[in-house]
Image: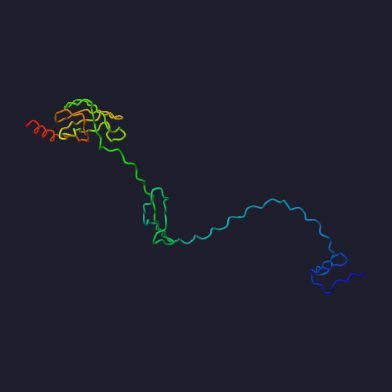
Amino acid sequence: MALLFPASPATGTVYTYNGRSWYYDGSAWLIQGTFGPTGPTGTGATGPTGPTGWTGPTGWTGPTSTVSIGTVTTLSPGANPTVTAGAGTTQYNAVLNFGIPGSATGPTGSGYGGLILTSAIAPTFGSNQTLNFTTNKTSIEAAYAVGVRVRISPPSTPTYYMEGIVSAYSASSMSIVITDSYGSGSFTTWNISVAGLPGSAGRFLAMNLIFGL
């Protein structure tokens, strides 16, 4: 049977008959074969890297930004610190409010008050001697330390005293090197306090009062 191709076909027209196809290329009908399997991908060498593109124009200068401190608040001990935006904060101007945890109150330290000295034998008033005492507080409980100048006075006669330097203080035992004294009598219980070094004028005035110089 003769093939009946379409009349006045357009270029690219495909005509199929009895399982076969023809393609019109603009001047003639060309029979088309069946497509074979896709061939392998080529493995040609990679081409060279192209040149670097041109540098773009410099962007516009942005507005100046500022950072300032607003409020500083003390928080409870152990709280987490905070930083928040404060009043007056804008896109370019930051006002920061800080919350800072406070410190916990520490334990009460050992002081100088309340320390009592006792001795089995009443010491004699006088200087240039070392006296040994038992204390009602240990060296950890009281603030006195070796090298501190002290004054000891009998509670019943506080105007009498002996002064000197603490030479040893361990546990409940204290030793004092006596350098000055005033008074007389026998006392086995003494109050103690920190003393300052007397000035030369003070020494001279004391001698006038005691000896009538």
Count of residue discs: 0
Q: Which residue is depicted at the point 25% across and 37% down?
A: 114
Relative image position of residue 195 (x, y in whole percent): 20, 35
Q: Viewed as shown, does residue 104 lie left or right of 196?
A: right
Question: In front here: 146 or 108?
Answer: 108
Q: Residue at x 41, y 48 (%)?
A: 78
**Residue that appears at 84% across and 72% down:** 6
Residue 120 at x, y percent in the picture: 23, 26
The colour scheme used to paint the residues is: rainbow
Q: Residue furthest right?
A: 1
Q: Quadrant of the C terminus?
A: top left
Q: Residue furthest left?
A: 212
Residue 47, position as x, y percentages in the image: 66, 53
| Viewer-proximal residue among 170 and 4 | 170
Residue 199 location, quadrant:
top left
Quadrant of the frame with the N terminus: bottom right
Q: Is residue 116 left or right of residue 102?
A: left
Q: In which image quadrant can residue 32 be found?
A: bottom right
Work out whether 198 lies above or below 13.
Answer: above
Residue 67: image quadrant is bottom left
Q: Position of residue 125 (x, y in %)?
A: 16, 27
